[in-house]
C-alpha cells in the first residue's frame, strides 16, 4: 500500500468510529485482525488486553457505542511509515461515558498495521487507569481479551 492509501484507510476507520459507521469499520478490518492494549493499570506490568480476530475487534469497537454517548479524538497527529505498512495516530479523546454522562479524556498513541488494503493490527497506548476509573463493566469479550493478555504476558510480549 502507498503512504496515502494507508493513511486514508486509517483516517476513515477512526472517523467511522467517531460517527458510529459500523459498515466502514467492518470493511476496514482484516479477518485476522488483532487489537492489543499493551499498557495495563493497577501495577500490572503485562499486557492489558488482546482481542483476536475480526469478530472480537468488532465486538470491542461496537461496544464503545454502548459505553460512550460520544467519542471523538482531537489534536490528531498522523505519522506513516515510509512503506505505508504502519500508521500512527497521537491524539486526545473527548468522550462522554454513557451511563454516568461524565467526561472521559485520555491521551493516545495508536499504531495501525496495514496490509492488502485492510487494518491487520491495532496497538493502542493510553492510560488504562483512566478507562478503569469510568466504572464501565467489561463485556464477556473484554474479559476474554484481558485473560488472554494475562496469559500471554506470562510467556511473551505482543507488540
Image (cartoon, rainbow, N blue to C red):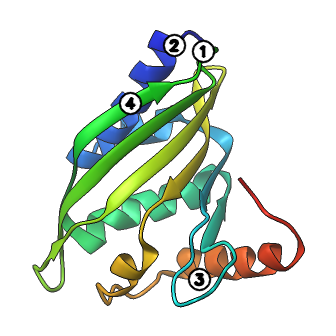
Query: How far, Cα to Cα, is label 1 from label 3?
Result: 36 Å
Q: Residue at x 29, y 65 (%)?
A: 106
**Residues under numbered marks 1 and 3 in contact, where contact means CB atoms less than 8 Å apart:** no
Query: How far, Cα to Cα, is label 4 from label 1?
Result: 13 Å
Query: How far, Cα to Cα, is label 4 from label 2?
Result: 11 Å
For numbered disc 3, what is the local secondary structure?
helix
The x, y position of residue 103, in whole percent, is 13, 73
For numbered disc 2, what is the local secondary structure?
helix
The quadrant holding residue 145 is bottom right
In the image, residue 63 sits, relative to residue 84, either above or below, namely below
The x, y position of residue 85, in whole percent, is 63, 24
For numbered disc 1, what is the local secondary structure?
loop
For numbered disc 4, what is the local secondary structure?
strand
Query: How far, Cα to Cα, is label 3 from label 4?
Result: 31 Å
In the image, residue 56 sits, relative to residue 135, either above or below, namely above
The quadrant holding residue 13 is top left
Nearest the eye: 47 or 45: 45
Which mark is first along the chain, 3 or 2?
2
Please name which of the two marks, 1 or 2, marks the residue nearer to the observer.
1
The x, y position of residue 105, in whole percent, is 22, 67
Asked whether, in this view, residue 144 is left or right of residue 110, the answer is: right
**Residues under numbered marks 4 and 1 in contact, where contact means CB atoms less than 8 Å apart:** no
Which mark is first along the chain, 4 or 3?
4
Q: Which residue of the protein is positioned furthest toward the left in this rendering? A: 101
Q: Which residue is mark 1?
A: 82
Query: How far, Cα to Cα, is label 1 from label 2?
Result: 7 Å
Q: Residues within 10 Å of mark 4 (few under 14, many from 20)?
A: some
Q: Residue at x 57, y 70 (%)?
A: 39
Q: Which residue is mark 4?
A: 78
Q: Which residue is mark 2?
A: 3
Which mark is first along the chain, 3 or 1?
1
Q: Which mark is residue 143?
A: 3
Amino acid at each position: 500500500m502507498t503512504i496515502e492509501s494507508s493513511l486514508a484507510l486509517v483516517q476513515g476507520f477512526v472517523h467511522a468510529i467517531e460517527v458510529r459507521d459500523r459498515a466502514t469499520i467492518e470493511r476496514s478490518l482484516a479477518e485476522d485482525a488483532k487489537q492489543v492494549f499493551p499498557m495495563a493499570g493497577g501495577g500490572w506490568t503485562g499486557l492489558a488486553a488482546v482481542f483476536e480476530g475480526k469478530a472480537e475487534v468488532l465486538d470491542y469497537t461496537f461496544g464503545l457505542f454502548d459505553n460512550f454517548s460520544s467519542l471523538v479524538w482531537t489534536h490528531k497527529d498522523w505519522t506513516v511509515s515510509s512503506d505505508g505498512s504502519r500508521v500512527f495516530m497521537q491524539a486526545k479523546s473527548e468522550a462522554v461515558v454513557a451511563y454516568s454522562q461524565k467526561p472521559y479524556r485520555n491521551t493516545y498513541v495508536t499504531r495501525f498495521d496495514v496490509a492488502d488494503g485492510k487494518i491487520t493490527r491495532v496497538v493502542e497506548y493510553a492510560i488504562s487507569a483512566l478507562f478503569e476509573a469510568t466504572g464501565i463493566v467489561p463485556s464477556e469479550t473484554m474479559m476474554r481479551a484481558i485473560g488472554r493478555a494475562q496469559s500471554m504476558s506470562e510467556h511473551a510480549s505482543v507488540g
